[in-house]
Amino acid sequence: MLVGMRKFIACRMVGLLVATTLAGAAEADWARFRGPAGSGMGALPEVPSNLTEKNFRWNTELPGGGHSSPVLWGSRIFTACEDRAGQRRCLTCLDADSGRILWTTWLPCAKQPMHLDNSLAAATPAVDAHAVYIGWVSGNRVEALALDHAGKQLWHRDLGAFQATHGPGASVIVVDDVVVVTNDQESPDAALHGLDRKTGETRWRVARSSGKPSYAAPALRVAKDGRRELVIASPAHGLTSLDPRTGKQLWAAEGLFELNVVASPVLGEGLVLATAGRGGSREGAVVALEGDTARLLYRPEAKLPYVPTPIVIGGQLFLWDDQGTVSCLDLKTGKQAWSQRVTGPTYTSPVTDGKRIFGISRKGELVVLAAASEYRELGRCKLPEGTHATPAIAHGSLFIRTFNRLIRVSGTE
C-alpha cells in the first residue's frame, strides 16, 4: 500500500511539473517533438526500470521506414513513414490502446539529396485537437501541410526553396492557432514562418540569413512577465526569441555557434541552453543564457552532443552525446558531476519522468539511468531493431518508434 501511494505521489508530482510547461494541450498528450514545450518530460508510472520484451504492450509494424518521432493526442498516435523506392511518404495514425493502424495517407515527394542516415520521413509532426501538421521537403521545395484526425488533407503550402547537403529534418510546432515552420538553410528563401493552423495562410514571416542549416525545433518559453516566446537556434543567428503570435523579435544572441545546429534548445530554471557540433568529430559547443537578458553565463567543457537534444531535470543538465557518453552538469554553473560511456552511437534524444532518463542507441539498445548527481544504471533492454527517433511519453507509457515499428512499453515492476 505504501509503495503504491509513493508511486501515485511521484506520478502526480511529475504530472504537475509537465502541466506547467503545456501550451493548451491536455496533460496526457505528447503533441510535438520532445513533448510539452519541448521538455522531454512526462509521467511513466507504468514503466519499470528493468523492462524487458514482456513489457511491450503491443508492437506494430508500420507501413514504411523512417525516423519521425511519434506524437499523441488523446487515444491517437501519429508518425510519418517513407517509401523511398516509390518516391512517396505517409502520415499514419494508430490507436494507442491496441496499436492497430487506423489510417495511412500517402503523399508523393520528389527526389532530394540527403545524408545516408537521413530519411524522407525524418521530421516529427505536431498535433492539436483540430489537425496534424507537418513540415516536409520535396525536391528543393519546403512544404507545410495539415491533415485532419481522419487523414484528410486540409491545406498545403509551398514555402520556398530548400538547399542543404544533409537534406531536411526540422520539425514544426503549434502554439495556439499558429503553426511554426523553421526553414533555416542555405538558400535565399531561408525564413521562419507562422501559419494559420486552420487555413495555412501566412500570419508572419521572418527572413533569415542563408547559411548552415538548422534542424532544431523551437522551444516554447514563458518569461518572468508571463509572456510566451519561441526560442530558435541556428548557426547564422545564434539564439533568437520571437513572439509566437506576431513573429516580432524579443531578443537575440548572435555569434554563439560556428558549427552546425541539430539539437533543439532546452529550458530550465530561467536558463536557455543550446548545442552545436559537427558530424564525425568530437567538436561541439554548449551555451547557457539567462533567458530574460540573453546574457551568456557559461560554455561548459564536456562530452558534447551533436544530434541528441540535452535534457534538464531539476538543477541538472544531462548531455547524451552521439557516441553514447552521458554527462551530468550543474545547471547553474556548468560544472561536471560525472561522465560515463553507457551505450553505442546515438541519434535519439533522451526523455525523462523526472527521476529516470531513457536513452536509445542507433542499434536499439535502451538504457535507463538515474537522474542524479551520481551515475547509476537502472536497466537495459534490447529493442527488436535500431532507431533514430525520440520516444514519446503518454498514458503512463513509453512509445518507441524504431526504423519500421512502433512499440508501446508499459507494465509494473
Image (cartoon, rainbow, N blue to C red):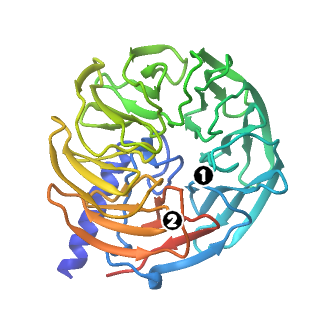
Please, is residue 314 above or below residue 86 in the view? above
Q: Nearer the viewer, mark 1 or mark 2?
A: 1
The reply, left or right, for residue 299 in relation to residue 189 is left
Number of labels in the image equals 2
The reply, left or right, for residue 159 in relation to residue 215 is right
Q: In the image shown, does 148 or 104 lie closer to the viewer?
A: 104
**Residue lying at 66% horizontally and 27% vertically, measured from the top left:** 195
The reply, left or right, for residue 9 in relation to residue 273 is left
**Residue lying at 50% horizontally and 54% vertically, measured from the top left:** 29
Please, is residue 56 above or below residue 212 in the view? below
The reply, left or right, for residue 405 in relation to residue 91 is left
Task: Report helix, strand or loop for mark 2.
Answer: strand
**Residue lying at 16% horizontally and 45% vertically, measured from the top left:** 336
- Residue 320 coordinates in the image, percent (x, y): 34, 52
Residue linked to disc 1? 117
- Residue 334 coordinates in the image, percent (x, y): 19, 37
Can residue 19 be seen by looking at this rendering?
yes
- Residue 330 coordinates in the image, percent (x, y): 17, 42
Residue linked to disc 2? 399
- Residue 146 coordinates in the image, percent (x, y): 72, 41
- Say which amino acid is labelled 2: Phe
Quarter of the figure with residue 273: top left
